[in-house]
Image (spheres, grey):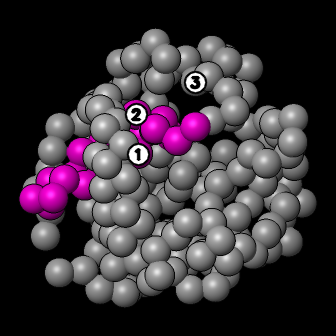
Amino acid sequence: MSSKMIVNYKELYDITSTLTPIYSDCGELCGKICCQPDSEDNLGVYLYPGEERMFTGKENWLQWEHRNPAEDDFPPSWGFPVHFIRCTRSCPREQRPLNCRFFPLAPHLLKDNTLLLIHETLKLPYMCPLITGRTPLRKDFAEITARCWQELLRDSRIRDLVEMDSREREREGCRPYVVYPGIKIF
């Protein structure tokens, strides 16, 4: 059983620092669209609990928001604030948040505690060619991302979110594209 814990984000950042989904810069396929502000300046990522410690809060390339978890559809276990960040310009690659490092993969947890890595299913304001073209991703990218998710899911708050998102996909009848086959977790 998972519990509320402090994730070793430094270790996760270290093992994903040079990792990329394909062997070339995927940003060349789309003009780095996921790193550009959308027309309403809503594009950004949420940080996982404790991940904000990887930043000073004074980065000149980030805009910070402290959001209410209940208003942004997070599980009750997530306390205030939930950190949401937007890039104001290109980021130092070594400081990218985990959500950026893992993209286009997302976790999906089956009811029997099998972790799958799937293509992201969130509605995005852009089309990612890795998703739309079902581009084969590097095997080491998927393996290390899975390893990171095994660690992240030890935190009950993160597991609550992944379970909530997984059940919602299932209720909606979403059949996600599985990129990395199941790993049985605790």
Sequence-wise, which precedes: disc 3 or disc 1?
Answer: 1
Name the disc covering residue 106, or none.
1
Amino acid found under the numbered disc labelled 2: His
Task: Give yes or no for residue 109 being in the magenta stretch.
Answer: yes
Binning the other alpha carbons within 10 Å of mark 2 as few (below 14), some (14 to 19) or many (20 upward) gives many
Q: Position of residue 167 (x, y in %)?
A: 30, 56
Residue under the image location 15 percent in, 44 percent down:
182
Closer to the camera in the image, 92 or 64: 64
Task: Give yes or no for residue 63 being in the magenta stretch.
Answer: no
Looking at the image, is 87 positioned above or below residue 23? below
Closer to the camera in the image, 26 or 119: 119
The total number of labels drawn is: 3
Q: Which residues are magenta?
A: 103-123
Sequence-wise, which precedes: disc 3 or disc 2?
Answer: 2
Q: Which residue is mark 3?
A: 128
Image quarter for residue 159?
A: bottom left
| 47 left or right of 10 in image | right
Alpha-carbon distance for marks 1 and 2? 6 Å
Q: Which residue is mark 2?
A: 119
